[in-house]
Image (cartoon, helix red, strand yellow):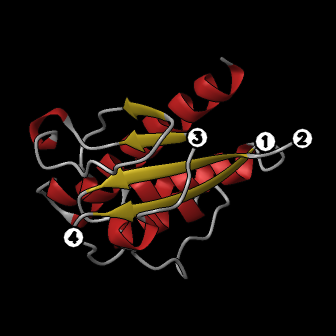
Amino acid sequence: MNKKRVLFVCIHNSARSQMAESYLNALAPDRYEAVSAGLEPGRLNPFVVRAMADDGIDISWNKTKSVHGFLGQSFDHVIAVCDKDAADRCPVVPVTGEKLHWPFDDPSSFKGTDEEKYRFALSVRDSIKAKIIEWIKG
């Protein structure tokens, strides 16, 4: 069986797209090959790294990547995971295949104490994981 290639895109590739990539690769490695990228690659969000580790997935060694590095590649699905407020800035990648938008809140934009930021990252993580599971089953 040929694996379907999926590109998750967002603004900085520091949180949501990294989580989506990691969950799809972990939960359906026989069916999908996922990568992620951003329009303006930033730094991995430490609260997201911690939240993913708490679910058994180590992304601490992941690097943020630019969507420009994937231009010209073929993907079956390109999934934007920017929130509704950033939808106008969310990267549009010229590819063949299905384009989807799954809006998730940005853990990097949340203000509060470190504990509040971590709990928010957990909430976003759980939403992304649930969406990936639903999509795999669908």
Mark nearer the N terminus (3 vs 1)? 1
Amino acid type for the residue under numbered disc 3: Asp
Q: Where is residue 56 drawn, in percent x and y?
A: 67, 60
Q: Say whether marks 1 and 2 touch (CB < 8 Å).
A: yes
Mark pair 4, 2: CA separation: 34 Å
Whichever of labels 4 and 1 marks the residue nearer the N terminus, that label is 1
Q: Determine whether label 4 and label 2 are within 8 Å by CB.
A: no
The amino acid pointed to by label 4 is Glu
Q: Nearer the viewer, residue 23 or 90?
A: 90
Locate residue 118 relative to residue 136 in the image: left or right: left
Q: Can you tell which of label 3 and label 1 is closer to the viewer? A: 3
Distance in Å between CA atoms under marks 3 and 1: 12 Å
Give the amino acid at mark 2: Met
Q: Nearer the viewer, mark 1 or mark 2?
A: 2
* Precedes in sequence: disc 1 or disc 2: 2
Q: Check residue 1 in the rendering and tell me which mark sits there, or answer none.
A: 2
